[in-house]
Amino acid sequence: MSPVNSIRGLAAAAEAPVAPGVTLADIRAAAERIRGAILRTPTIENPAVSREAGTRVFLKLDNLQPTGAFKERGAANRLALLTARERAAGVIAMSAGNHAQAVARHAQLAGVAATIVMPKFTPATKVVRTESWGARVVLHGETLAEAAAHAHDLALREGLVFVHPYDDPGVIAGQGTMVLEMIEDAPQIEALVIPIGGGGLCSGVAAAMAELRPGMPVFGVEVEGYPAMAQRLAGQPVRVGGPTIAEGIAVRDVGETPLAILRRLGVEVLLVPERAVEHAIALLAEGAKVVAEGAGATGLAAVLTYPERFAGRSVGTTVCGGNIDPRILANVLLRNLLRDGRILRVHLDIPDRPGVLADIATRVAAAGGNVIEVSHQRLFAAPSVQSAELELMIEVRDAAQGNAIIAALEAADYVVRRG
């Protein structure tokens, strides 16, 4: 999701009129309208995830959509609502991520010309994927806000229909179709936890549940560095920023329509730290064999961060996107292994003589460890010319086995420091 403002432009976003609300009837009509255009994704309970969370957790796998994210739903519904004149004119959207591909794909399926404005910093892979759906991609601006302003200008100059990523009732109704499938597949769900970027998905879900299951709690989730919706709901100035693995929901300017819906329905927003999101990504990958991007894992991160809020309840959340860079995923998994004590990193000052490395490796192996990386520095890092510094990365079962390996090395008079 990208921080795009309303069609009236960036400066007028704060005074944009609130569009009509979204009802359960709107969402059901959207579900019929987009049937066959999007994938009906499964809702599963995974034992490893539920065990870690301490309660039953049902996962809606919208990361399985063709473009890897739930954005397909809103884009498909909004494009299906175009008039004949609008279809002939074509559509435009601004996004550096999932919304771009969703609009491009469904425009191609509908035979509608699509223009997508992306910031210049957008990774080449995302540009190529968007172009592969037949869209014209325009790279403009150093920031998301600059790209958004250019998209609005193009829409006015070329007579294109702007497809907003979240501040549009048609998009919101499309996103809300997700929860109809969730409740049909897992009627035992007693609470819902939904990621918030601009608010389109959470407001669509909340609007549906307010009529479908009155009284069922719906929680929104934001990362601590980007609590824009929580701040707006509390009447506070918006202060956001900083790096986050959940860049898909790193939004400054939330939608006015989603804000009005969430405020009217009293939806509470939970904030989660970066570490919790990383843990959720790793748990989904290892425990559920599900690939999630940062934004797609924030719902589970909230369930893990606030166990007291969900104890004894069957909880539903969505893996709303799976478009994570493989290098980022690999780093997250390795960091999680380190935190869990399943990778042991140690430093040793060792005498610089033959056979020492072999002796250490033998002792590690005897204790059940597997050395996966060795760094041996004798020229600059060692405290004496007669010694060397050794750094080892060792794969272990758990923290207890790591402690046993350290004890075995210390018993042989090696000085060991955890890295």
Image (cartoon, grey):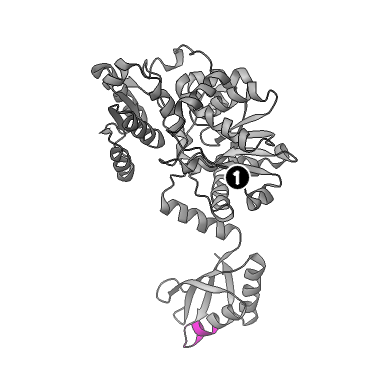
Check if residue 139 falls in the magenta segment.
no
Residue 396 pos. (x, y %)? 59, 69
- Residue 186 in the image, given as x and y percentages of width and height: 64, 38
The N terminus: image quadrant: top left
Task: Give the quadrant of residue 405.
Answer: bottom right
Point out the image quarter for the C terminus: bottom right
Q: Is residue 358 magenta?
A: yes
For the record, the magenta segment spans 352-359
Name the kind of residue labelled 1 in the image. Ile
Question: In the image, 113: left or right of 305?
Answer: left
Question: Observer-nearest residue: 65 or 32?
Answer: 32
Q: Is residue 219 left or right of residue 29?
A: right
User: Residue 12: where, in percent of width, then height?
Assistant: 40, 14
Does residue 153 show up?
Answer: no
**In the image: residue 278, left or right of residue 412:** left
Q: Which residue is mark 1?
A: 44
User: Which of 115/141 is in front?
Assistant: 115
In the image, is residue 250 above or below residue 10?
below
Please identify the quarter of the rendering in which residue 140 is found. top left
